Image: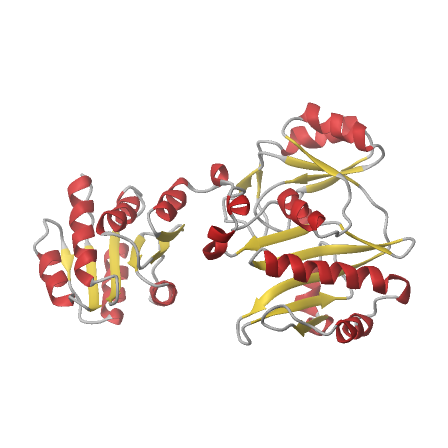
């Protein structure tokens, strides 16, 4: 689950990480009032679930409250397209008015889960800021990694040596080490999958201040953190994705014509890749969770039938355990009954109760093709979508 910058900073503040003072504004009048209260120059930031705002005009600086109000007028209600948003961008509903700080040097810091080692890992670079991603691509050696224990455990002396190797000045080493230690605690205690501070400003007097922050939480662990779960911003989420989540389906809408009905994240990604390699365009990513009932799966199929761009359904399911193949055919029948619109269906299933599912799908009042394997299923779906 992605958090907005203001939400992420609220969490980091609880762990003692120094932050500029800031307030959320939903109108130009509020922006001016907050700028007045903060005094001096302020940063005006669009609150969206994506990075790259600075390069896309989503972070601006205002010297006066009137300038802050003008920035707010320009941002609020507008669409911001960055390198990390979808093609259509994200609408700006709120902005963050924050004290602007002067600093001559900054760092990049983030904590992620290293998928290969299955441990939390500190990612750091001696230079942060809006151009960090491009700089890191141009000079990969600037990015350094420090793996932690599976429980976040680490040797403070070794971590301090890592930061020294990174070039952190002696005058700021204690402050930076304190920020990293606090990041580790926040990462582990909140079941985060990402905590990023970029930039971490090195300010006069030996301090270190988190100018921008991003946190992504593990959605599968939110049952342990009801207060964090309540931070989910469903108002800005795709309605179809929210409905799918409520029905035990991981769903991401895309721009293509081939609706994918798949169980399992790995099989879903493989199906997505095969469709693209064959020259097709997926309309979505789907991962049916093991607990999903036939009625819930029918809701997911219905989301695809409701999408006028979808010209064919590609069902690619491996039945086993709690999700049997006949549950998928039952769901297809329920979705067909509930919707006036039908599209051709490529029905590829394997595993538990596959034969019963194929027979049931073939009997439905819709054009249904039952291929022998995944490769043929993808080829047929792409061919149907291109007709």
Q: Residue at x 45, y 56 (%)?
A: 220
Where residue 246 sits: x, y (%)?
A: 36, 45
Nearer to the camera, 65 or 273: 65
On the question of residue 189 being in view, the answer is yes
Using residue 276 as the reference point, say whether residue 206 is left or right of it: right
Q: Is residue 324 or residue 349 the one in the foreground?
A: 324
Quadrant location of the C terminus?
Answer: bottom left
Between 80 and 353, the one lying in front of the other is 353
Question: On the picture, is 99 further left or further right than 56?
Answer: right
The quarter holding residue 323 reads: bottom left
Q: Position of residue 362 (x, y in %)?
A: 10, 58
Which residue is outermost to the top?
29
**Residue 257 place in picture, x, y as percent:** 32, 52
Coloring scheme used: secondary structure
Count up the numbered dots.
0
> In the image, what residue occupies the spot 89% across and 67% down?
170
Q: Is residue 108 visible in this depiction of the protein?
A: no
176 above or below 29?
Answer: below
Residue closest to the far front: 224
Residue 124 position, x and y percent, is 71, 66
Residues 63 and 147: in front is 147
Q: Residue at x 80, y 27 (%)?
A: 36
374 shown above or below 131:
below
């Amino acid at each position: 689950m992605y958090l907005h910058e203001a939400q992420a900073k609220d969490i980091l503040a609880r762990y003692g990480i120094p932050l500029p003072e800031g307030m959320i504004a939903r109108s130009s009048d509020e922006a001016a009032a907050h700028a007045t209260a903060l005094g001096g120059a302020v940063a005006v930031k669009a609150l969206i679930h994506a990075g790259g705002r600075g390069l896309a005009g989503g972070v601006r600086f205002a010297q006066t409250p009137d300038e802050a109000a003008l920035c707010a007028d320009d941002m609020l209600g507008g669409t911001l397209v960055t390198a990390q948003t979808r093609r259509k961008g994200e609408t700006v509903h709120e902005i963050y008015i924050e004290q602007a700080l002067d600093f001559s040097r900054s760092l990049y810091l983030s904590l992620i889960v290293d998928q290969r080692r299955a441990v939390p890992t500190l990612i750091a670079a001696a230079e942060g800021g809006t151009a960090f991603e491009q700089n890191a691509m141009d000079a990969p050696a600037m990015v350094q990694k420090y793996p932690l224990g599976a429980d976040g455990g680490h040797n403070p002396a070794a971590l301090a040596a890592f930061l020294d190797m990174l070039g952190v000045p002696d005058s700021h080493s204690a402050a930076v080490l304190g920020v990293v230690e606090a990041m580790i605690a926040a990462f582990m205690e909140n079941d985060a999958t990402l905590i990023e501070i970029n930039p971490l400003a090195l300010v006069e007097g030996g301090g270190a201040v988190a100018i921008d922050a991003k946190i992504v939480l593990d959605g599968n662990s939110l049952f342990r953190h009801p207060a964090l779960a309540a931070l989910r911003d469903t108002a800005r989420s795709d309605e179809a994705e929210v409905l799918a989540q409520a029905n035990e389906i991981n769903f991401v809408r895309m721009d293509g014509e081939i609706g994918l009905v798949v169980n399992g994240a790995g099989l879903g990604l493989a199906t997505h890749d095969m469709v693209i390699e064959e020259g097709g365009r997926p309309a979505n990513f789907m991962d049916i969770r093991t607990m999903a009932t036939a009625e819930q799966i029918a809701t997911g199929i219905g989301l695809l039938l409701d999408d006028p761009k979808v010209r064919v359904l590609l069902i690619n399911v491996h039945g086993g355990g709690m999700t049997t193949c006949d549950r998928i055919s039952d769901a297809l029948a329920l979705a067909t009954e509930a919707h006036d619109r039908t599209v051709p269906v490529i029905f590829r299933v394997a595993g538990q109760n596959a034969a019963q599912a194929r027979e049931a799908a073939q009997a439905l009042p819709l054009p249904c093709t039952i291929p022998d394997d995944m490769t043929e299923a993808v080829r047929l779906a792409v061919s149907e979508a291109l007709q």
